[in-house]
Image (spheres, rainbow, N blue to C red):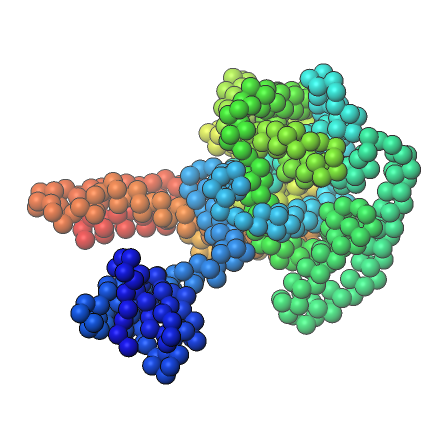
Amino acid sequence: NSALCDPGGPTAPVVNAGPASLPVPSLSRGTSLRAAGVSDDAVGARGDEVPVARLSTAPARNGARSAPATPTLREQTQRTVTDALADLWGFMHGSKLDAMYLLAATALVTPLSRRAGVSPILGYLALGMLMGPNGFALIEGVHSTEVLAELGIVFFLFEMGIELSVERLMTMRKDVFGLGLAQFTITAAAVSTAARWANPGLPGSALVVLGGGLALSSSAFVLQLLKDKGELGTRFGRAAFGVLLLQDLAVVPLLVATPVLAGGGTGLAAALSSAAVKSVIALGSIAFIGRVILTRLFNIVARAKSQEAFLGVILMTVIGMSFLTEGLGLSNTLGAFLAGVLLSETKYRYQIEADVAPFRGILLGLFFLTVGFEIDLHLIATNFPLIASIVSSIILVKASVATALCAAFGLSFSNAQQVGMLLCQGGEFAFVTFGMARGLGILTVFQTKILLTSVALTMAVTPALVSASEALAKRIEENSGFTHYMGEDRDASEIKESEDFVVVVGYGTVGRLICDLLDSKLIRYIGIEANPNRAIEARNRGLPVFYGDVTRPDVAEAFSLGKAKGCVITISDKLDTNRAVITLRRQYPNLQIFARAKDAAHQLRLTKTLGVVARVPILPEDNLLMTLPFGGAVLSNLGSPIEEVNAILETKRKEMLAAREAEHNADRAYLSSLMGVVGNNGRTKEEKAGAEKNGEVLAAGAEHDGEEAAAAGEDDLVTQVIKAGEEAAAEAKA
């Protein structure tokens, strides 16, 4: 049974397997027979089974059996780790790894983008470009990801449907049905004309898709910009929001008409008639299901007080309605939109909106990630002149049309050009429309790639353009003369001519909070501030805050307080509040007045003697969150339902807590860097004494700032400023 060797060379050892010898390849130490390709039958055919350890990679000498090679512990550990990693990679490779990449993207893109000072949408686009097939190809299931991301658009349109209540549309009817409709139709016609001039060979269906798709702007992008900067209550912010609402309405017929346009427009009338009939069927079915079934179902689930069941009903409603319209041959987004409109009139509207928001945010982020899949840097490099001309043309046409129309509808030039820059980019539904047109053969693959890349680039440059327009607007406002700050301009006249505005007297901390809450309800307001510095600063930001003293009857008359729905007095000084209330009550006996009281006795006097709704908004004085009930009382007395008020206050509370945490972290980081706390251990006695003195100086300065803030009425800042100084002194002495 000695090992036999191939005379032809030492690298072909054989195993004695009976009458014949079986050649096997040269093996490393510890490799099994089966791994080498040796079958069980070929081993030990005569009962002399050869164990693995008896194999040798070197030929036997003088007929002696070679010594077995035993692997070391390190080699066994390395092989075990290698095999485990290989098994893990084989298990995770494919859809599981795709899911991990996508979840990591949704978790990290938003905080990293905020830290970098850019929009999260740009972060998703950039990451999608890197992870997609035109980048490092980390995502293998691109089609599966796109199908999942389409649900983001479904939930987004559902949320837009909830926002489009009849009350909101009527409040903004001029901006929605006037300015918005004009912007969409004129922009679509201008884009179609430009496309026909640039490429005369384009069919009519492609021109319609191009005009309608590029006339849309990004609701998610623009609204996020306005909310981040607190500009939704400005005149240009309200105008942009009204245009976006109309565009959201226009998306539905555009998505319905796109399949109809496939085939060069043959049988267009019959196809449109069929689509109209299907739309009526879908609308009737959704209305019946919503009013007869869903309302009762929501009542039953709400009484059970089960958040899981309530969320399940919401998801079932959104997805079920989208499946209904898609099954009828229409767009799935139509069903989601109609379901949102239907539920917007129920008392569960704000709870539904709050529960759907996380799903919508994640899925919409995945949608923008898939949009990034379409960005091809090689395509941009090889077709740079073409893409650059398309991007510049889109921005120029859309900005020019929006600016001109806003000026025609009575907006000042500073506000009009800001609306133009806000709406100059392509929208998220352009990706949906152009993708659908590519699948239907209306657009070629190359045309679609060029268009999607161009739209993505218009989004990328929008923040820079908006910043430039804000700088231009500020310069225009500063050069407008002081009458601009006294309510004698077009913006103030437009508000005063309406009959649904509220007057807020005082634009301090509480006054700003009240104005923010009114913005969340899209209630028009005029702010009147006796401090010229505050009034000028707010007016330069585009807010409807003007300089004036309401205790003067001519000022109150100039701002049309007699036509206002109500007047909210947020002055911190007790005597000034009394003078303002007495003057307004004498001049306007029927005016609804809400007043900020200093204490319980002051509240009782204002309520009993002067007949106003008075609240003590700050208890304790260092907590701005305690002003929220005062704002809630204002909204309730203006006619808002209690469920809606509670939802608005909860949203505002979360925003304030997040802002306070971020500000606190920034203050501590600044103080630490200012005083060099980190490197204090290696200092000399003189340096440590200097650091301690700096801390004492900071504490004294903070106390002085707190006294000034208290004198100015900024009660909530006093304790925070002094506390920051005390922390600085404590850190310096540590």
Q: From the viewer's perspective, tell me whether residue 543 is left or right of residue 211.
A: left
Q: Image quadrant of residue 713?
A: top left
Seen in the picture, residue 658 relative to 3 is either above or below; the reply is above
Residue 113 image offset from top left, x and y in percent = 46, 41
**Which quadrant does the N terminus fall into?**
bottom left
Left or right: 139, with 208 as reference point: left
- Residue 508 higher or lower than 354, as above or below: above
Q: Nearer the viewer, residue 237 or 81?
A: 81
Q: Residue at x 61, y 22 (%)?
A: 390
How many marks do you count on the picture?
0
Q: Position of residue 660 (x, y in %)?
A: 43, 49
Q: Residue at x 23, y 52 (%)?
A: 730
Residue lying at the far bottom in this picture: please name it. Answer: 47
Give the percent coordinates (x, y) of residue 168. Answer: 72, 43
Residue extending furthest toward the left: 685
Residue 498 visible, this angle: no
Point out residue 331 in the picture as x, y percentages from the top left corner.
76, 46
Indicate left or right for 593 with 264 as reference: left
Query: In terms of image quadrants, where is residue 257?
Result: top right
Q: What residue appears at the point 37 percent right and 48 percent down from the top-left corner?
A: 664
In front here: 611 or 12?
12
Answer whether residue 704 is visible to the viewer in this image: yes
Q: Residue at x 32, y 50 (%)?
A: 723
